[in-house]
Amino acid sequence: MRALGSADQMAEVLDAAVQAGINHLETAPAYGPAEDFLGRALQRSKHRPAGDWVITSKLLPGLSLEQGQRQLHGILERLQCQRLDNLAVHGLNRPEHLLWAQEGEGRALLEWAMESGLVDQVGFSSHGSQQLIAAALDLELFTFCSLHLHLLDPQRLPLARQALHRGMGVLAISPADKGGRLQAPSAQLIDDCTPIAPLELAYRYLLSHGVSSLTVGAAQASDLHLASQLAHRGGPLNAQEQECIQTLKQRRGHRLGAELCGQCQACLPCPSEVPIPELLRLRNLVLGHDLIEFSQERYNLIGRAGHWWEEIDASACDACGDCLPRCPHHLPIPQLLADTHSRLKATPRRRLWS
């Protein structure tokens, strides 16, 4: 989704990916010219991984059967391939999306894709709630999932472990950029993770939990250098890695003190529908590791990214106090939300895909 200057740029990234030991390409029609460039690059590439590429693409929820059939044929045409290894529902984020896949036109589309031989397996990506993801896993309709799994936001790891236990593939969505812009970390975060680079620690953290694929948004060959280094470094965390993660947590806790939000979700539901844990998570990152640029970017996307991100910011809190008796840590939640808004509200920026 990032090597979008030309098919030549995409081919350069593909060749570097082979050298790094990568064999899985994940794309989507929503990523501008990515599929077209990828298809052309695949035809020109002189190098392929052992066993060939595993290719995943995605379709947005809500399509009719006819629309989905037409779009799947378009994907195959752009990629210049006869079939897809994996087809995912792109953004199973709301209950109506789940219903569409479970019993609506989406169910018919996914069944047709499998029965036609155009797709080997179907799955989903989700930016939705943990409850929604759990419900999707329980359907036993999907054989892989793509989730937000991050060193600095491990809330969905129990869901990932549940999926892995069921034999599903689990792909971590953007552990670098959406994980805290770890490709360009703050000086404080670098110090908190020393002697291991934050991104390396984040990748190793996920691999140690058995996550089967990590997405690496490469715009150029050099972006795959770390992936190449970690190609054969799965398995449990070593003593140094464990110590770094423990130090990271301790320093965050020390800096936030009694104002650290533990992300337990007990404060929900909010009568004003404020996504309290998610907003206080951003505050944790600002005060805990000085990730101000990332947190401001995420905060100012609220209400501007549809169902891909939160739609209500901290200014909607009317200090009703409904959440206060439910918080096991007795946090002054309305005051913390007001502080979050004051720290992070800024001029909105354009998101990558909008």
Image (tube, grey):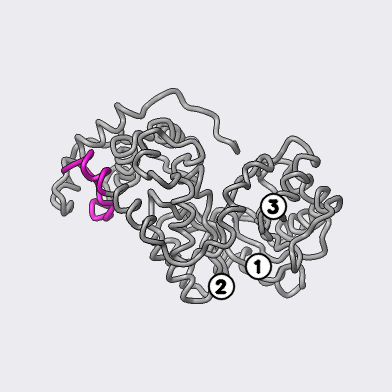
Disc 3 is placed on an element classified as: helix
126 vs 61, nearest the viewer: 126
Question: In the image, is residue 275 part of the stretch drawn in magenta?
Answer: no
The quarter of the picture where residue 342 lies is top left
Extent of the magenta region: 250-268
Which image quarter holds the C terminus?
top right
Q: Residue at x 84, y 54 (%)?
A: 46
What x and y, as percent, mark residue 182?
47, 41
Q: Are marks 2 and 1 in contact (CB under 8 Å)?
A: yes
Residue at the disc numbered 1 = 110
Disc 1 is placed on an element classified as: helix
Question: In the image, is residue 267 part of the stretch drawn in magenta?
Answer: yes
Q: What amino acid is at disc 3?
A: Ala
| Left or right: 45 in relation to 112 | right
The local crowd at label 2, few if under 14, some if 14 to 19, many if 20 or more residues have their Cα within 10 Å, is some
| Left or right: 322 in relation to 234 | left
What x and y, as percent, mark residue 151?
41, 52
What x and y, as percent, mark residue 171?
55, 60
What x and y, as percent, mark residue 199?
48, 46
Cα–Cα span, label 2 and label 1: 9 Å
Earlier sequence position, callout 1 versus callout 3: 3
Look at discs 1 and 3 and give the one toward the viewer. 3
Residue at the disc numbered 2 = 141
Earlier sequence position, callout 2 versus callout 1: 1
Residue at the disc numbered 3 = 17
